[in-house]
Image: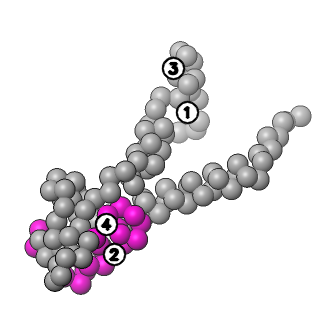
């Protein structure tokens, strides 16, 4: 008879909240222009909105939408310095995604102990 593992509702709720947070970050990074913006802000530390528009090469309205999505996900901040907005990367906001990717790319424990992992049907 197979055993069934029962998880406490609180643990399931925390796990679900964690995966939803990770999905929100991944979705916000799921466009090449947004990845370019994040890379640019990482390199330059902060940037004025019009500089981002020039660098990315998209229309101002399109770039603004990408910035809005990144800001809503908590990946960037925008400080208003009239008439401009200065954007900065919040690298610590990406740490949960970084940890998740590190965890899922580790060698499984069964392989570390010298036992081959079953690969299943090809």
Point out the residue furthest to the right here.
1
Neighbours of disc 4 within 10 Å: few (<14), some (14-19), many (20+): some
- Indicate which label's residue lies in the foreground, 1 or 4: 4
Q: Nearer the viewer, residue 45 or 97?
A: 45
- Considering only order in the chain, which callout, 3 or 4, is on the residue closer to the N terminus? 4
C-alpha span from label 4 to label 3 = 41 Å
- Percent across and percent down for residue 65 are 30, 78
Tag shown at residue 77: 4
Pointer 2 residue: 68
Q: Nearer the viewer, residue 42 or 31?
A: 42
Circle 4: element type: strand
Neighbours of disc 1 within 10 Å: few (<14), some (14-19), many (20+): few
C-alpha span from label 1 to label 2 = 42 Å
The quarter of the image holding the N terminus is top right
- Indicate which label's residue lies in the foreground, 1 or 2: 2
- Considering only order in the chain, which callout, 3 or 1, is on the residue closer to the N terminus? 3
Verify whether residue 56 appears in magenta: yes
- Indicate which label's residue lies in the foreground, 1 or 3: 3
Left or right of 51: which side holds 20? right
Q: Are marks 1 and 4 in contact (CB under 8 Å)?
A: no
Pointer 1 residue: 119
Verify whether residue 71 appears in magenta: yes
Image: magenta residue range: 52-78
């Amino acid at each position: 008879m197979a055993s069934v593992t029962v998880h406490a509702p609180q643990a399931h709720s925390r796990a679900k909240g964690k995966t939803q947070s990770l999905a929100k970050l991944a979705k916000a990074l799921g466009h090449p222009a947004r990845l370019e913006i994040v890379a640019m802000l990482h390199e330059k530390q902060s940037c004025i909105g019009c500089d981002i528009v020039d660098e990315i090469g998209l229309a101002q309205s399109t770039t603004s939408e990408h910035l809005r999505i990144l800001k809503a996900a908590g990946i960037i901040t925008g400080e208003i310095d009239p008439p401009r907005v200065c954007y900065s990367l919040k690298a610590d906001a990406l740490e949960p995604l970084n940890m998740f990717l590190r965890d899922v790319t580790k060698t499984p424990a069964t392989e570390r102990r010298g036992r081959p992992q079953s690969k299943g049907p090809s």
